Amino acid sequence: MERRNSVLAAFAAVTTLFFAWGFITSLIDPLVAAVKGIFTLSDTEAQLSAFAFFIAYGLVSFPAAALIAKWRAVPAILIALAMMVAGCLVMLGAANIANYTLVLLGLFVLASGITILQVAANPLAAALGDPRRSHFRLTLAQTFNSFGTILGPALGAGLFLAGVEVADGVALTEEVRANALGGIDRAYFWICGLLLALFLFFFLMRRTVSSAAPPIGSGKSIGALVGNAFSSRWALIGAAAIFLYVGAEVAIGTQMALFLNSEAVWGITLEEAGRLVSFYWGGAFAGRLVGTALLAAFPASRLLALFTAIACAMCLYVVAVGGGT
């Protein structure tokens, strides 16, 4: 019983990390729209915000795996949280001096920490318990991640997008610009504080988590890890599937506010459009809740094939009918 309670406590601690990075990641959606107006950017330039954030996933994942292989999961998580705090501090500086280059740097540092966090926390959540139920635990933890993504756009829209207009030829007033920058400053200030609290919480829980889970790292070098990954056909297929899934998920989220704001689509205010992004992430939350329940009753491979087919059918529908109605 004591061992079971320890595992449950460790899983609860790890699940808080899923919520935190989901919330922070989804703030990118209203931020992309906000910086377009604040810094008078084109759509492509504004999307550099998303690029600076998500390119970290590709660049830092393998170094993160090497870090975990050497120092194990719990120390890597603490390093990741410290990096996320550093990224928030850069964002605070960027908002106070209104410098877009610093915004991009802050987002990259923040996302680098989140990448290390994901590389450590995903296998850790899967390992905390019966191996036969690992996919169930991971989906459950991801459900809390999705709950964080619902809150992010709703909060970010109110803080970043109030009064912001991005139509061609329209310049923001100094008051609106200052309010938007102030909203960014306030959001990342509180996130910084919450991350510090999470760092302290996880530091205090480190022995509980370490004792409850088997070692995640293999102790192998980065070269050996890469070699093993590329020698597995299923690892490559899985990586390709995640590439497509994450690419679609991120592209939809970051573009949705600008899409709905367009006169050719709905023409609603940018703040209203930003809040509606929460419904998109709410769909992901509902899907993961349903997925968690289904995984308890059906094989993961069959569910994956079924929902892949459904996603393909929906994409074909949008191509054939259009997505503006």
Image (cartoon, grey):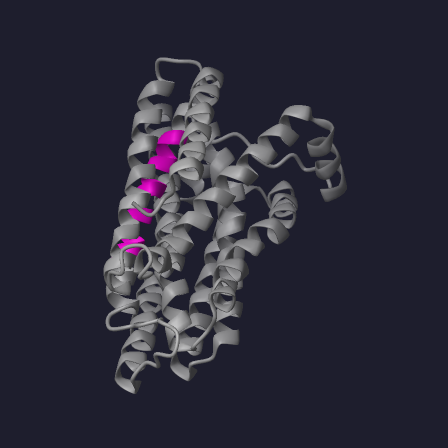
x, y percent for residue 120:
52, 42
x, y percent for residue 99:
47, 79
Query: Residue 212, can we see it?
Result: no
x, y percent for residue 162:
24, 70
Which quarter of the rendered picture does the C terminus lie within? top left
Give whichever of 91, 313 is nearer the camera: 313
Indicate left or right for 58 with 45 as reference.
right
Q: Quadrant of residue 56?
A: bottom right
Q: Residue at x 36, y 60 (%)?
A: 258
Q: Which residues are magenta?
A: 139-154
x, y percent for residue 36:
41, 70
Indicate left or right for 135 with 170 as reference.
right
Indicate left or right for 14 with 86 as reference.
left
Decide whether residue 305 is among the magenta residues: no
Which quarter of the rendered picture does the N terminus lie within? top left
Decide whether residue 148 is among the magenta residues: yes
Query: Residue 271, can we see it?
Result: yes
